[in-house]
Image (spheres, rainbow, N blue to C red):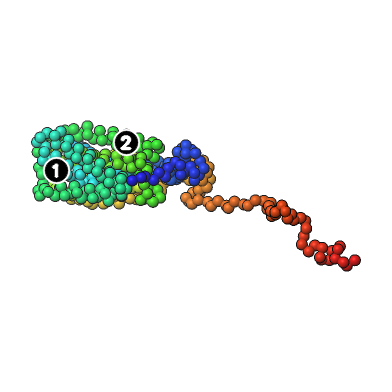
Amino acid sequence: MGYDEPGRESAETSSGIPASVLENVFDDPAHGEPGRDRLAVHVVWEVLLLVGLAGVAYLLWREDPDRFRGDGLRELLVDAVVLGLLAFAAGVSLRTAAVNLAIGPVAVAVALHVAEQGDRGLGAAVGPALVAAALGGLVLALAVVVLHVPSWAASLAAGAGVIVFIEQRSAPVLPQGDYDPARDALYLAAGFAAVAVLAGLFAALRPVRRLVGRFRPVVDPARRRGVLAGVVAGVALVVSTVLAALAGALLGTGDVGPVAPVTGLDWTVLAVGTCLLAGTSAFGRRGGILGTLLAVSLVTLVVADLRAEGHSVSRWAVAAGALGVGLVVTRLVETYGRPRVDASGTDGNPDPDGRISSGWAVQRADPIGDWPPALPTHHAENPVDPWNVPKWESGRGWDSGDR
């Protein structure tokens, strides 16, 4: 199937500007949305997340100081890494506007597999699971990109297929391996934090942000966005599925207790909600730098604080709260993160396409005809004197006979 290429050539012919100029002026040259994305809204929101994180950490320290030292701290870090991998998986797919809703079921399925096969060794148990996750993510990517269908629908269908595999277990599975991720909790947490921050910094670069957001629809969601956009979205779907499998591998090891054969959709909602809470737009492309790390830490501490106070914590309830707040954050990001446009142009540059700040195009005036008007043409064999006015001699003139 062919791809529509609404890119450089169409933008150049519609505005009359060279494509090289459009690349520097527009964050999305194919659409012609003037200006460049603003990151100030992400900075402000991440400062608020940091303040909230400090407040919840203080409450948890007052309630249960042991959670910040020894085994309590290691358990807290492992919980944060598991949620962080799932939120990072959701963020990778969301930034490309191809959300992967199968990450929760994939994590549970891999956790069940690792728990059953853990006695064969960690590598022998995790390796095949990662290969299967990569192949499954590739099939999902081909379905989304080649057919160009909504990723949420395709990934939901993929998640339903994974749930069929999960439901073959009728009872919880006790982990058979002897590896305990709590022993490496500090290294796992430091590795996740480094990857999350570096990925946020890398995605903040304008060329990278433009590249990962090419799959984001701009006019008609059913219109293809080009081969490169499809490739980027497909890679993101594969990477997000593998990250979900890594999170499931941690869930199926150590002293976490039996792994229940649940659907895992609550993990999906919690991961997507945490990702939106971090400042990633639900529409794709736009996102922050430290938001994922701060949002994961905040949600982890909120759950720990509720448990320390003796409350029964439902993952669905926490996921609903994170998702609700995250949708509000998406609206703020899309409102204050889009380019600032005035009536004269973009970021101080004149708007050559006649667009005003409201996004409507000013209609051009119809061309004026030739001026002065041309005299009528006549055949050469019958010339007409332009000064010969009809009936000039028949009126009350000099030759009218009234002398």
- The amino acid type found where label 1 is placed reads Leu
Q: Which mark sits nearer the N-terminus, 2 or 1?
A: 1
Based on the displayed image, in which of its 4 quarters is residue 98 positioned?
top left
Looking at the rendered image, the quarter that the C terminus falls into is bottom right
Identity of the residue drawn at 27% across and 51% down: 153
| In front of the other: 166 or 232 | 232
- The amino acid type found where label 2 is placed reads Ala
Based on the displayed image, in which of its 4 quarters is residue 338 positioned?
top left
Taking the image as shown, residue 391 lies to the left or right of residue 24, namely right
- Crowd class of label 1 (few under 14; some 14 to 19; many from 20; radius 10 Å): many
- Kindly tell me whether residue 321 is visible in this rendering: no
The percent position of residue 240, horizontal first and vertical second, equals 26, 41
- Crowd class of label 2 (few under 14; some 14 to 19; many from 20; radius 10 Å): some
Residue bearing mark 1: 112
| In front of the other: 194 or 34 | 34
- Please tell me whether mark 1 sits on a helix, a strand or a loop: helix
- Please tell me whether mark 2 sits on a helix, a strand or a loop: helix
Identity of the residue drawn at 18% across and 49% down: 163
The percent position of residue 96, horizontal first and vertical second, equals 33, 43
The percent position of residue 344, horizontal first and vertical second, equals 53, 45
Q: Residue furthest front?
A: 381
Q: Alpha carbon of mark 2 to alpha carbon of mark 1: how far?
A: 30 Å
The percent position of residue 358, horizontal first and vertical second, equals 48, 51
Taking the image as shown, residue 340 lies to the left or right of residue 62, namely right
Residue bearing mark 2: 199
Q: Is residue 386 above or below residue 41?
A: below
Identity of the residue drawn at 81% across and 66% down: 395
Tell me the number on the disc at residue 232.
none
Question: Which one is in front in this view, the residue at disc 2 or the one at disc 1?
Answer: 1
Identity of the residue drawn at 42% across and 45% down: 6
